[in-house]
Amino acid sequence: MLRRKRLPDGSLGELEKVGSIPTTEEQVLSLGEELAQEKVKSIQKDLLINSLGSQLTQLKLDFISMKGGGE
């Protein structure tokens, strides 16, 4: 939104920008960026879960091995 500020002498000054409403394109770009960030977070979380699962499996195998192979 543009407006002209009234000067002390009563005349109108230069046009100045007052606030702005994002365009549809800006909103779509912003949402796309947020979506990409959320996807990266999701991938990182999946990698962590898989890593923890592998560690847990290895611990279980080590435990079984220590007990004599489950005999």
Image (cartoon, grey):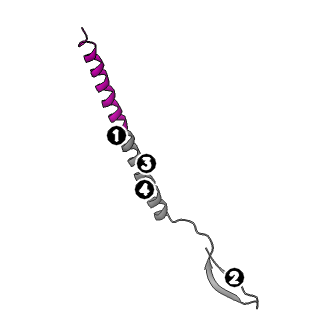
Residue lying at 28% horizontally and 26% vertically, measured from the top left: 58
The residue wearing badge 3 is 38
Rounded to the nearest whole Å, what is the CA distance between mark 2 and mark 4? Answer: 37 Å
Query: Where, by quadrant of the figure, is residue 8 drawn?
Result: bottom right
> Where does the magenta region start and end?
48-71
**Which residue is labeled 4 in the image?**
32
Q: Depth check: 49 or 31 in front?
A: 49
In contact (CB < 8 Å): disc 2 and disc 4 = no
> Is 68 a magenta residue?
yes
Q: Secondary structure at mark 4?
A: helix
Which residue occupies 24% across, 12% down?
A: 68
Q: Position of residue 24 (x, y in %)?
A: 49, 63
Q: Sequence order check: which comes first, mark 4 or mark 1? A: 4
Say which of marks 1 and 3 sits in front.
Answer: 1
In this view, the residue farthest toward the front is: 66
Disc 1 secondary structure class: helix
Please report whichever mark, 1 or 3, sits nearer to the chain's N-terminal start: 3
**What numbered label is drawn on residue 47?**
1
Establish if 63 lies above or below 47.
Answer: above
Q: Amino acid at mark 4?
A: Gly
Choose mark 4 or mark 1, whichever is in front. Answer: 1
Q: How far is the residue under mark 1 from the one under mark 3?
A: 14 Å
Q: Amino acid at mark 1?
A: Leu
- Residue 47 % position (x, y): 34, 40
Q: How far apart are the two marked residues, 1 and 2, measured between alpha carbons?
A: 56 Å
Residue beneath disc 2: 5
